[in-house]
Amino acid sequence: MKAWLEISDLQKKIDDDFQLGPIDLRIVPGTITALVGNNGSGKSTLLKLIMNLANPDVGNIKVFGKFVYGQDESWKNQISYLPQTRIGWDAYSGNTLKRLIAPIYPNWDDALFIQIVELFNIPLNKPYRKLSQGIQQKLSLALTIPRNTPLLLLDEPTSFMDMPSKKQFVDLVVDWMDQDERAIIIASHQAEDIRKLSDYLCVIQNGKHVGTFEKETLTEHYMRYWIHGAFPEQRIPGEVTREKHQLISNDPAATENFLLKNNVTWTDRSKLDLEDIVSHLLNAGKEG
């Protein structure tokens, strides 16, 4: 399947003590990819590089087959970007912002805009700066998703939302994805957003690309065992960590084969939560 977004060998140095990349990433239609990592890992920087709001030191980014830093910027009509901080919106009401933004996007869906406004009970007459952070976030989504571009970039879209609103957001995004051939990249620290929405996880630790993983494959491959008796001294195949009588493996078949051959028994086993898996991947990236 042809990728809508192609990132190859992307590197960006920020100050003297931080480098993002190298990063290689492909985004294909019909998928949601979550950017996950520690604070300051470079997720927001990566989104800015995709939008050509910052220049890479090395590497290439193509959106719909066009280099983002070329003369042709027509690709921008096919991508919507919601940054963490909206600059220049403070003095304007939601109604005014909509009148400014909607004409730029040929596929703007006014009915969807109204639906989101009503769903989140967003006041459209108040200046943006006078709204709470949660309402600002909801208005920003109402001004972004209805652009109906094939590719949507969201940077921490639910960071100030309450729990009911987060669930409504997830349902909204799932429904939006079902309407047409689309793709989303979402940078988030919210475990529920990642668990419910993502198909793939692009894991970044302090600028280093640990890897891009299929979510379902990850959840199938990580297992926790409660070991009866002493651990073998040697490393067990698939072993990620061991502590007291618990063993975490990312290759259950190899682990269980070894345990059986060496007469090591376990009293129980269970799959890891996605949040725990991500923590182990980030620790692995830190050590690497």
Image: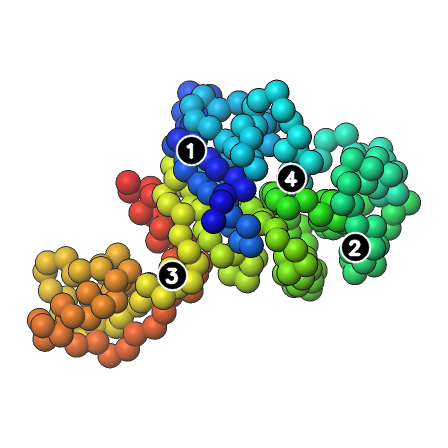
User: According to the image, label 3 marks what residue?
Assistant: 217
> Which corner quadrant of the image does residue 53 belong to?
top right
Q: Residue furthest right?
A: 125
**Position in image of residue 174 (x %, y %):** 63, 61
Is 129 left, or right, of 184 in this rendering?
right
**Position in image of residue 102 (x %, y %):** 81, 40
- Disc 2 and disc 3: Cα gap in Å? 34 Å
Tell me which label, 3 or 4, sits earlier in the chain: 4
Is 183 left, or right, of 23 in this rendering?
right
Disc 4 is placed on an element classified as strand
User: According to the image, label 4 marks what residue?
Assistant: 79
Disc 2 is placed on an element classified as helix
Tell me which label, 2 or 4, sits earlier in the chain: 4
Residue shown at the point (19%, 65%) measured from the top left: 254
Residue contact at pointers 3 and 4, CB within 8 angstroms: no
Residue type, mark 3 in image: Thr
- Residue 117 visible? The answer is no
